[in-house]
Amino acid sequence: MQHPEELLKQYEANFSKNNFNTSPTNLYKPVEHIMQMKGKKIRPLLVLMSCDMFGGDVQQAMSPAFAMEVFHNFTLVHDDIMDKADIRRGQPTVHKVYGTNAAILAGDVMLAYAYKYLTSVEGVKIPALLDIFNKTAIEIFEGQQMDVDFETRADVSLHEYLKMVEYKTSVLLACCMQIGAIVAGASADEQKKAYDFGLYLGLSFQIKDDLLDAFGEGEKVGKKIGGDILLNKKTYLLISTMQLASLAQREQLNHLLLEADEQKKITGIQELMKATGGYEQSNQKAEQLFNAAIEALSSISIDLSAKQMLTAVAQKINTRDY
Amino acid sequence: MQHPEELLKQYEANFSKNNFNTSPTNLYKPVEHIMQMKGKKIRPLLVLMSCDMFGGDVQQAMSPAFAMEVFHNFTLVHDDIMDKADIRRGQPTVHKVYGTNAAILAGDVMLAYAYKYLTSVEGVKIPALLDIFNKTAIEIFEGQQMDVDFETRADVSLHEYLKMVEYKTSVLLACCMQIGAIVAGASADEQKKAYDFGLYLGLSFQIKDDLLDAFGEGEKVGKKIGGDILLNKKTYLLISTMQLASLAQREQLNHLLLEADEQKKITGIQELMKATGGYEQSNQKAEQLFNAAIEALSSISIDLSAKQMLTAVAQKINTRDY
């Protein structure tokens, strides 16, 4: 099996130039704006590694890999409009530079291109690719809506939160793994295991991400520590903390959620997350989900070195080293 | 060949119930809002008639026909956001009722559903369906961008205007015809002729539409007469008028474009459209394009009664009786 860096090098060689039409420029400049931001390329990497580990021809998986990156970037463009986000990967967001209308339309055309590149493969493989991708795309939009709905609800359960994360984030990683497996011609059973690996990895990643947002860790967090806390964002971490809190702690927490002094709010809630055991429980949950990912991987009939390589990538993703 | 009303009856029977997921409701209520508006179902009708005239099984074309209606409605939802349109088919637009974010996301999920329904056919037909649909979807987004760009340009040529209309409006009708032909198993040559019929019909329809907007005709215009005139919209009619105007008429026109009194502006420009010959030229162009559509149709090897039925439908579309 090829090394991840080697796969990414081939990917970059295939897609370093422009892969969209160029006119009208007011449509394609916004597309270029998001596509040239240096992303981590996690999704195409998973497609290529999955194809490679099942013994498929990686070149055949290049277009679908690119499709997943285009799709992911499309969701970022539209999500940034909805979240009124000004900055993405250290650069101004598409709608900030080109306006909301241009960002809507750029996203739309990117979604069409994602389908185009996804299906630039042998005809016989197209139906299976479309099945999983259509399902995934629909789930992602549903997950985004759940996330929006949760903003105005106080009673989100851990179960509901995990479902939202599954749809909004995890299913795309899972889909990438399955797409690689389909291109490689893996059996339905092997496809399912590859899918599960991506699904659990995504869930684990998100809970880790919630922890990093609240507590940081060196320079791995590109954003301000405590951002979610200031927004009262119902993360796994905050929901756990609420559930585990004693009556007194609960009251304290409710006060802190309304606290205007930002530093006081962050420090106070951080302390409660630790004191209640919410921090500990979230850490354990992330670990448990990561182990489930590795278990799914280990049940696949591929050689050990491939598993080790994918495990290393999963660890890097999970600790934001990717 | 079955009568159009009969085909539409079967279509309604297939898709009268909800054809989307229902949860989260905040995602799918906006989808339902636009889908329940009584549209004319021109696009699914063209898919079904095209399939039927080539001797295909109309039931096989139902899902793709629905896909085209979903796609068309998706473009309306996003276009209405961009145009800040409050009313559509006599009802408040999706973003007006549910907000811009919900309308963006509802549109996105509809595009995924369009692909899902389009490809709910025999596997062997999927690649050809995707080829034409991907191309068409991308062109439609490009056409929408051209339309936006033209708003701030004074020098739009007739050629550019026709290209914009081709992309924004006509290619979807053409695509519907080709999709029906593909499902029926028609040859590439026959598919192309069916496509051209739709393309010319769409172009002719739009120029007629521009004429109706400026001059009305009984109760066929659902909107206020002169809407385009008040917006200085660069239609085929206005561009022709500008090009044919004498120096004196041109000066008059430039004044009228800045006129604040709405009725004075409409009447003045209407008069110039007739006096310059712009009205006449637009009428001739619409007729010429309609004839090109009928010519494409007549070159297809199907029986005369089918051609007559499709010609009648084209005439109804073109005169807004559909």
Image (spheres, coloured by chain):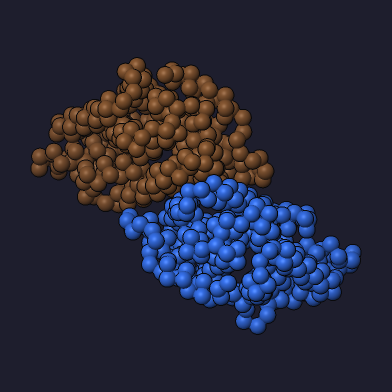
Chain colours: A brown, B blue
Residue B180, quarter of picture: bottom right
Residue in front for this viewpoint, B112 or B129: B129
State the residue at coordinates (42%, 71%): B13
Locate residue B62 relative to residue A135 in the image: left or right. right
Q: Quadrant of the N terminus of chain A?
A: top left
Q: Is residue A209 visible?
A: no
Residue in front for this viewpoint, B52 or A3: B52
Residue in front for this viewpoint, A115 or A20: A115
Locate residue B319 relative to residue A192 in the image: left or right. right
Residue in front for this viewpoint, B123 or B202: B123
State the residue at coordinates (53%, 50%): B125
- Residue A199 image point, x, y percent: 32, 36
- Residue B243 image point, x, y percent: 84, 62
As drawn, the residue found furthest toward the left would be A247
State the residue at coordinates (52%, 27%): A59
Residue A212, quarter of picture: top left
